[in-house]
Image: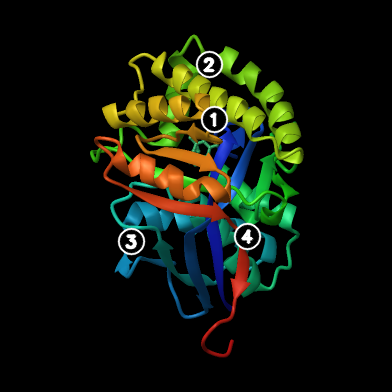
């Protein structure tokens, strides 16, 4: 009834931005990502018969009722399967550099799924855990795997075929990602809300959705061939089109800051001059710059020289979510 786990964050090369069902959190399209070390969440779950409610401790402090309710609803999915109603203590720690403004829901729900499964000894398959993680956060479904993973949107109404699958492990192509930290400031709008607002109000929503399948096909081929030029084209157009669809919402969703654009422009210039680097941007102002191991120092140095950049975080392709040894006997 007690287990610990670790899961890494991931960054989408082909973006997920739209749902086909909200209650089950089913994505409208597939997506494709790279799991990233060392950005990770460590989670400990302890089911205790005496508890009258679930508790959540996040980074050493008691979490808000809202965050606790979200975790509790997630643990319910496992309790229903196991046919139990025992409550749990959940302790979670995000090893993300503070003030980086990086999303942690992907690693958080992947780690939680793995820890709850181990604590209850439900022995669920990885695709089933991935489908469950998806219900916590869509991007979390991909963090079950190391290296490159693809989210399948599925077709069934119950969402049992909407889970991620592994494409290649990190060793296949150990890409690095230098995260350029752009201007601080309050996040414009969270991804869940942002993608729904885009669906409801952006005339570019459907064209964006239609563009994802060809991008997935091209990204798979580029990764298989370790072709950074082709992957650069696909990943940049996926990020640009996702943001274009959001910018065309009414009112517009604009995640970019001046520094975001400065990094995007610089990366394009460097690549035109022969450097194997390309960018992606999530629901925030930071820019993620992908490159191969040999170029990582050059990329980091150049990014840090750009005006407005507050710092960088260097990541590398990471491994799968996994159970970690517990300190006390179970
Ligand atoms: C821009 O997975 O955070 O990072 O399913 O509503 O929790 P919910 O959304 P979330 O969205 C991620 C959006 C993105 C692109 C991506 O990771 O594919």
Relative horizontal placement of residue 68, taking residue 215 as reference (left or right): left
Of the image marks 3 and 2, the number of the one nearer the N terminus: 3
Label located before the other in sequence (1 or 2): 2
Label 1 vs label 3, nearer the camera: 1
Q: Secondary structure at mark 3?
A: loop
Q: Which mark is residue 319?
A: 4
Closest to the camera, between mark 4 and mark 3, is 4
Q: Residue at x 64, y 66 (%)?
A: 117
The residue pinned by badge 3 equals 63
Q: Nearer the viewer, residue 46 or 261?
A: 261
On the picture, is 312 further left or further right than 51?
Answer: left
Instruction: State the separation of the CA atoms marked 1 and 4.
Output: 30 Å
Q: Quadrant of the C terminus?
A: bottom right
Q: Residue furthest bottom?
A: 329
Q: CA distance from mark 1 to mark 2?
A: 34 Å
Image point 67% across, 45% down: which residue?
149
Q: Secondary structure at mark 1?
A: loop
| Residue reaching furthest to the top | 203
* x, y percent for residue 274: 54, 30
Bin the neighbour count of mark 3 within 10 Å (Cα to Cα): few under 14, some 14-19, many 20 and up: some
Q: Is residue 255 visible?
A: no
Q: Which residue is mark 1?
A: 274
Which residue position is annotated with label 2? 205
């Amino acid at each position: 009834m007690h287990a610990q786990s670790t899961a890494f964050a991931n960054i989408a090369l082909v973006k997920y931005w739209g749902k086909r069902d909200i209650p089950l959190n089913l994505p409208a399209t597939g997506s494709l990502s790279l799991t990233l070390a060392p950005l990770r969440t460590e989670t400990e779950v302890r089911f205790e018969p005496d508890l009258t409610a679930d508790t959540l401790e996040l980074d050493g402090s008691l979490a808000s009722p809202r965050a606790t309710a979200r975790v509790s609803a997630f643990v319910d999915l496992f309790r229903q399967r196991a046919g139990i109603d025992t409550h749990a203590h959940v302790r979670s720690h995000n090893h993300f550099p503070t003030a980086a403004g990086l999303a942690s829901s992907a690693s958080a729900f992947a780690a939680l799924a793995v820890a709850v499964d181990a604590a209850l000894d439900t022995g669920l398959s990885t695709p089933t855990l991935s489908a469950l993680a998806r219900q916590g956060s869509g991007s979390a479904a991909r963090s079950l795997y190391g290296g490159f993973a693809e989210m399948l949107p599925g077709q069934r109404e119950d969402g049992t075929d909407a889970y991620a699958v592994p494409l290649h492990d990190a060793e296949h192509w150990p890409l690095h990602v230098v995260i350029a930290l752009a201007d601080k400031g309050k996040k414009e709008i969270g991804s869940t809300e942002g993608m729904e607002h885009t669906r409801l109000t952006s005339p570019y929503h459907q064209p964006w959705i239609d563009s994802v399948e060809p991008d997935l096909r091209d990204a798979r081929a580029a990764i298989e061939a370790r072709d950074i030029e082709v992957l650069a084209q696909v990943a940049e157009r996926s990020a640009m089109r996702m943001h274009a669809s959001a910018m065309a919402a009414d009112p517009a969703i604009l995640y970019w800051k001046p520094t975001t654009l400065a990094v995007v422009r610089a990366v394009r210039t460097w690549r035109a001059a022969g450097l194997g680097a390309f960018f992606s941007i999530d629901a925030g102002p930071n820019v993620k710059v992908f490159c191969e191991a040999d170029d990582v120092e050059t990329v980091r140095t150049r990014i840090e020289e750009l005006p407005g950049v507050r710092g960088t975080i260097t990541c590398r392709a990471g491994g799968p979510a996994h159970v970690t040894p517990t300190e006390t006997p179970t």
